[in-house]
Amino acid sequence: MRIQLDLKGELEDELSETIASNFTVAEGVTLEDMLKKLPFVDRVVLTSVNGTVIARSDRASLVLNESDKVTLLPAIKGG
């Protein structure tokens, strides 16, 4: 099944050409399961699905659906 993966911040700058925006996942996959398959999961701080922020504690129970838009935001660097 296809979902839309929306990378923000430095993830977008570094990975937008290597990670397809239309991302394929298995039926019944949770947000946490999908994140574990990404090589940059340790850099993801905030996740949202269809515009709703998903707490880390809810990622394992949120099952993704066809055409969901998953937004991934890394920590912001600065000083």
Image (spheres, rainbow, N blue to C red):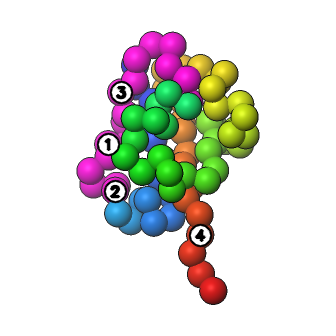
Q: Which residues are magenta?
A: 15-31
Is any atom of residue 4 visible in this view? no
**CA separation, marks 3 and 1?**
9 Å
CB within 8 Å, label 4 to label 1: no
**CA separation, marks 3 and 2?**
16 Å
Give the residue type that dot 4 points to.
Ile
SS for dot 1: loop
12 left or right of 58 in image:
left
**CA separation, marks 3 and 4?**
27 Å
Q: Eyeballing the image, is 73 above or below 57? A: below
Q: Nearer the viewer, mark 3 or mark 4?
A: 4
The residue labelled by disc 2 is 15
Marks 4 and 1, the one that precedes in the sequence = 1
Determine which of the numbered discs, if any, sits on residue 20 in the image. Answer: 1
Is any atom of residue 20 visible in this view? yes
Determine which of the numbered discs, if any, sits on residue 24 in the image. Answer: 3
Marks 2 and 1, the one that precedes in the sequence = 2
